[in-house]
């Protein structure tokens, strides 16, 4: 099979990671990057990436455009949108299925990550998360207010993604967020009301069966989120990233029909595997239809 020709719109934090992953993917060929600002362009040029001067020309050379930027382009092309780029297009299904059409969207990192947990655990009655969410990332001017915790009473895009994406396995989803002076991840204290009785050992076995879920013990060197991040840098991950959702083994408890656990999600990198999987499905679907 010939490589899938892709272009990336936006060389922001997510765009950089999508570019890195598409270059490493054995079935993809990066045709070009369309930066959205002078700073993004300078960074991409310094790294030797192929730069597109016009979006329309890049789209003509690609099978799928991966949109990670802030301004969704209006193109007649196969397009995969990151959740932050657009809410107008239909979302992929929890099981990985594609909606009809040429433009699809991957939901936010929290929805994708909790979706992985649910696919491993099975259907539940309801989900509740008490989430400590990052104030932003280190390059944002609004990031990490000092000495303050800010309760967030609604987050329209994330709330809609969690509700709609998880609906097949979790008909009721409740999230309460607190913005904290921190810039790396979202820490979820989760409670699942189970439909079927499961033991702690069964839960652990199911979680470990998914390669995009990492289960590890705090006592083995993962006592806090900094140590989780350091591990990925130590093993040579690109940009020190973690695409897996991290679950602390000690946090997993089953009390009657309720399951408790604590999970950490990297908003910048958790969605990258789903973006590439969606890109591959969309391209192959088009090829088979021709």
Image (spheres, rainbow, N blue to C red):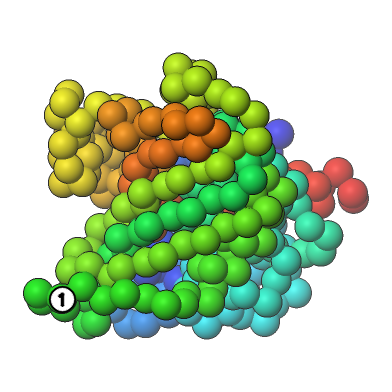
Near-viewer residue (110 or 45): 110
- Taking the image as drawn, is residue 196 in sight? yes
- Taking the image as drawn, is residue 6 in sight? no
Q: Is residue 84 depicted above or below 73 in this figure?
A: above
Point out residue 203 in the picture as x, y percentages from the top left corner: 49, 25
Point out residue 15 in the picture as x, y percentages from the top left corner: 43, 63
Point out residue 206 in the picture as x, y percentages from the top left corner: 52, 23
Q: Is residue 60 depicted above or below 1 in this figure?
A: below
Question: Helix, strand, or loop for circle 1?
Answer: loop
Q: Residue at x 60, y 69 (%)?
A: 160
Q: Residue at x 53, y 77 (%)?
A: 156
The furthest residue to the right? 290
The furthest residue to the left? 147
Give the mark count: 1
Q: Quadrant of residue 234?
A: top left
Q: Residue at x 16, y 26 (%)?
A: 219
Q: Is residue 211 depicted above or below 59 in this figure?
A: above
Near-viewer residue (132 or 79): 132
Point out residue 125 in the picture as x, y percentages from the top left corner: 64, 45
The furthest residue to the front? 256
Q: Seen in the image, is 236 located left or right of residue 129?
A: left
User: Which quadrant would the N terminus be assigned to in this image?
Assistant: top right
Disc 1 target residue: 148
Q: Quadrant of residue 232?
A: top left
Q: Seen in the image, is 26 located left or right of residue 172?
A: left
């Amino acid at each position: 099979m010939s490589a899938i020709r892709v272009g990336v719109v936006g060389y922001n934090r997510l765009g950089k990671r999508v570019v890195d992953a598409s270059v490493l993917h054995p079935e993809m060929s990066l045709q070009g990057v369309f930066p959205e600002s002078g700073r993004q362009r300078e960074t991409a040029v310094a790294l030797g990436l192929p730069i597109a001067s016009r979006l329309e020309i890049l789209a003509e050379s690609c099978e799928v455009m991966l949109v990670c930027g802030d301004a969704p382009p209006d193109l007649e092309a196969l397009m995969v949108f990151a959740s932050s780029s657009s809410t107008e297009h239909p979302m992929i299904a929890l099981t990985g299925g594609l909606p009809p059409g040429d433009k699809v969207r991957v939901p936010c990192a929290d929805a994708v990550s909790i979706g992985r947990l649910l696919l491993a655990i099975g259907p539940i009655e309801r989900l509740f998360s008490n989430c400590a969410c990052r104030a932003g990332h280190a390059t944002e001017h609004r990031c990490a207010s000092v000495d303050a915790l800010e309760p967030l009473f609604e987050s329209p895009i994330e709330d809609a993604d969690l509700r709609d994406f998880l609906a097949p396995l979790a008909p009721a989803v409740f999230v309460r967020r607190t913005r904290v002076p921190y810039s790396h991840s979202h820490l979820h204290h989760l409670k699942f009301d189970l439909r079927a009785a499961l033991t702690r050992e069964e839960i652990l076995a199911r979680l470990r069966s998914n390669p995009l879920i990492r289960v590890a013990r705090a006592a083995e060197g993962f006592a806090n989120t900094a140590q989780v991040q350091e591990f990925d840098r130590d093993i040579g991950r690109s940009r020190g990233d973690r695409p897996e959702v991290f679950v602390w083994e000690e946090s997993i408890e089953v009390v009657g029909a309720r399951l408790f656990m604590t999970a950490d999600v990297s908003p910048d990198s958790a969605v990258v595997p789903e973006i590439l999987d969606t890109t591959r499905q969309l391209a192959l679907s088009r090829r088979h239809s021709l």
